[in-house]
């Protein structure tokens, strides 16, 4: 990590010797290493969250980081002199180095290297799995499947485990793509797509598929396109995180779970600040729940086999901002009120009025998160 890669991100706005200013200890320039790759929306959000904390708390932190790929194995330089580290601890070598160096450090990854020694702040994998199940079921999708990462062969996949367990509690099986990761990785890209398409051919359709991340999800949408499998009509694909680039270049655009990376980064920086100031932590490991599902075209449909009911649901989606009443739906769709109520309860587990409220809340959340 070179000096050229060091960036002064935050400066205090008040001198320490003025009334209301920070103490000399609080404003001393501290060098913080960010051992975080810069390849996805998730990690960019982490870095932004750390910077946001430094600014909001008027910390005089100097950040050291370099552009890195998602699968690079990062380490601190041997002679690095600094005050703290925020890192994605994705391999044992980095965990061992941080523990030996006795530098205040916070892990923001889903791995567990250095567990209970290196404090960790990251997104709650179990909550993400539960959220994916709730999302699929609320939109009428049945049945389900899961694909773990084919690029992390030794990773313990808690997201997939939580997804399968949540489905099992509701009485649904969860087929899992189980190709040996090492063997899969030896295939060229076209052959990988063929293997994924062949696995999908063996599943009942339509099927709701959760992929470990957007990289894996985008590979599935491409495999479907080449094999003539319609997305989302035959296979609805949801990425286990949200990467803006992967979502945009996917065909169709890929839905994903917003894992609240900016919040994770902010809270990790807050934890690191406490460590550097010699304060005790309330907890060594803190999991932050995902914020929402970002819906794009890869799951953008209502998966019910009753066409009139599906039309009623689409009508609500098109008119949620109006002064919408049940009578308006019945006027537009040739259904009796009783048939409408029964259909909603059987297929979606809620009433038409609850669906109207749900859509309005969802749209309000999208406006709050995605616009000014």
Image (spheres, helix red, strand yellow):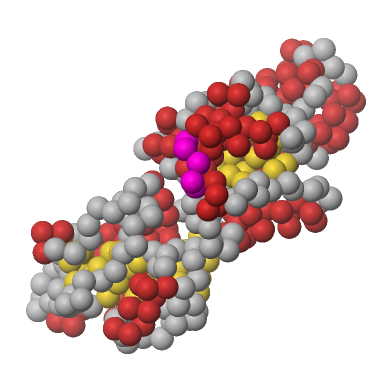
Residue located 72% across and 42% down the image: 144
The answer to whether residue 287 is visible is yes
15 over 219 or under it: above or below:
below
Which residue is more in the foreground, 144 or 57? 144
Which residue is more in the foreground, 78 or 279? 78
Q: Is residue 208 left or right of residue 43?
A: right
Query: In x, y percent, where is residue 316?
Result: 67, 24
Q: Any magenta on residue 187?
A: yes
Residue located 84% across and 36% down the image: 345
158 over 339 or under it: above or below:
below
Query: In x, y percent, where is residue 273?
Result: 31, 75
Residue located 53% across and 53% down the image: 182
The answer to whether residue 266 is visible is no
Residue located 27% across and 59% down the image: 51
Which residue is more in the foreground, 301 or 247? 247
Marks counted in the figure total 0
Q: Quadrant of residue 169?
A: bottom right
Q: Is residue 286 left or right of residue 236?
A: left
From the image, which quarter does the N terminus lie in? bottom left
Give the main secondary structure of the magenta stretch. Answer: helix
From the image, which quarter does the C terminus lie in? top left
Q: Quadrant of residue 93?
A: bottom left
Which residue is more in the foreground, 185 or 228? 185
Q: Any magenta on residue 44?
A: no
58 over 226 or under it: above or below:
below
Query: In x, y percent, where is residue 331?
Result: 77, 13
258 over 188 or under it: above or below:
below
Query: In x, y percent, where is residue 174?
Result: 74, 48
What stretch of residues is rendered in magenta? 185-189
């Amino acid at each position: 990590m070179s000096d050229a890669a060091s960036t002064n991100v935050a400066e205090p706005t008040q001198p320490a010797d003025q009334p209301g200013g920070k103490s000399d200890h609080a404003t001393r320039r501290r060098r913080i290493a960010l051992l975080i790759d810069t390849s996805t929306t998730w990690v960019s959000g982490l870095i932004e969250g750390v910077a946001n904390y430094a600014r909001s708390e008027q910390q005089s932190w100097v950040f050291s980081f370099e552009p890195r790929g998602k699968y690079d194995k990062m380490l601190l330089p041997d002679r690095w002199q600094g005050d703290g580290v925020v890192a994605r601890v994705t391999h044992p070598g980095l965990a061992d180095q941080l523990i030996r160096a006795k530098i205040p450090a916070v892990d923001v990854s889903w791995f567990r290297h250095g567990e209970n020694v290196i404090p960790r702040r990251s997104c709650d994998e179990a909550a993400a799995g539960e959220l994916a199940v709730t999302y699929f079921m609320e939109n009428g999708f049945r049945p389900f499947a899961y694909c773990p990462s084919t690029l992390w062969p030794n990773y313990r996949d808690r997201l997939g485990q939580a997804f399968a367990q949540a489905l099992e509690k509701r009485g649904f099986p969860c087929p899992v793509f189980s190709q040996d990761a090492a063997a899969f990785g030896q295939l060229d890209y076209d052959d990988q797509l063929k293997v994924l398409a062949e696995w999908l051919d063996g599943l009942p359709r339509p099927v709701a598929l959760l992929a470990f991340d957007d990289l894996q999800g985008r590979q599935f949408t491409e495999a479907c396109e080449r094999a003539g499998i319609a997305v989302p009509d035959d296979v609805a694909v949801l990425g286990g995180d949200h990467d803006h680039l992967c979502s945009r270049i996917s065909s169709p655009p890929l839905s994903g779970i917003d894992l609240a990376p900016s919040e994770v980064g902010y809270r990790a920086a807050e934890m690191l600040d406490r460590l550097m100031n010699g304060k005790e932590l309330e907890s060594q490991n803190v999991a932050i729940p995902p914020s929402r599902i970002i819906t794009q075209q890869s799951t953008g449909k209502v998966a019910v086999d009753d066409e009139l009911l599906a039309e009623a649901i689409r009508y609500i989606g098109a008119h949620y901002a109006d002064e919408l009443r049940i009578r308006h739906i019945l006027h537009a769709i040739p259904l009796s009120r009783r048939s409408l109520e029964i259909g909603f309860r059987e297929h979606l587990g809620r009433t038409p009025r609850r669906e109207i409220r749900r859509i309005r809340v969802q749209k309000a959340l999208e406006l709050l998160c995605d616009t000014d």
